[in-house]
Image (tube, grey):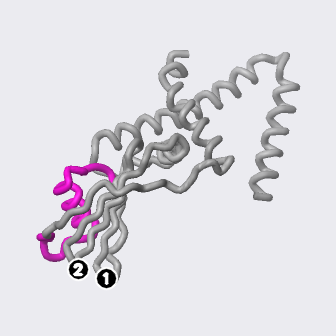
Amino acid sequence: MYLALFLGPWMLAYALSTIVMGHAWTAPQALALERELQYEANFQAGATPREQARQILVALDLDGAFSVQGPTPEGRLTINRQDLLTPRRIVYSAADGHVTVERGAFQTTTFLNRFHHRRGYDQPFAADWLMAISIDLVVVAMVFWAFSGLWMWWTMKATRGWGALCGVAGVALFAAFAWTL
């Protein structure tokens, strides 16, 4: 009971985000210009795109979880600063040393989608690791709940027939979806 109360917010968020994704209610993220500026890049020789992106984010005071694309043949580096509430896209053009920062407006559906797809172990930030650990705990709890339910069903002899019927029906329906989708 206490574990369920503690993990309730995660279960609610994943249930809502799954509904949003299942019904395709997620709209493309609307981005608005936040600022433009010149940036004199002084990257170390042989710096990877990820290292370059991290340097730019630190200089803009936007350090945190991110992904990077590029550079393109024109020298453009696109950084997606991951944030559940206010995601940003930062585009750096090496040709003219220009940086554009665009901020996403808060939308409930895109927030839930970002929450559902959040990954943390590939980022070097404590909050991302703690979120990933908490999600692992939710998964372990769900597996425990499933197996404890099976154990309780098996120990109640009066419910074995209906339980077996429900279990077989569930496995059959799952298999049918798995093979046809």
Mark 1: which amino acid? Answer: Glu
Does residue 178 appear to the left or right of 19 in the view shown?
A: right
Image quarter of the N terminus: top right
- What residue is pinned by disc 1? 74
- Drawn side of residue 97 relative to residue 135, left or right: left
Q: Nearer the viewer, residue 32 or 68?
A: 32
Q: Earlier in the sequence, mark 1 or mark 2?
A: 1
Q: Which residue is mark 2?
A: 95
Residue drawn 75% across the image and 54% down it: 178
**Which region of the structure is painted magenta?**
41-66
Residue type at mark 2: give it.
Ala
Residue 156 against residue 144 in the figure, above or below: above
Q: Residue at x 45, y 43 (%)?
A: 106
Query: Which corner quadrant holds the C terminus?
Result: bottom right
- Is 55 magenta? The answer is yes
User: What SS does tag 2 mark?
Assistant: loop
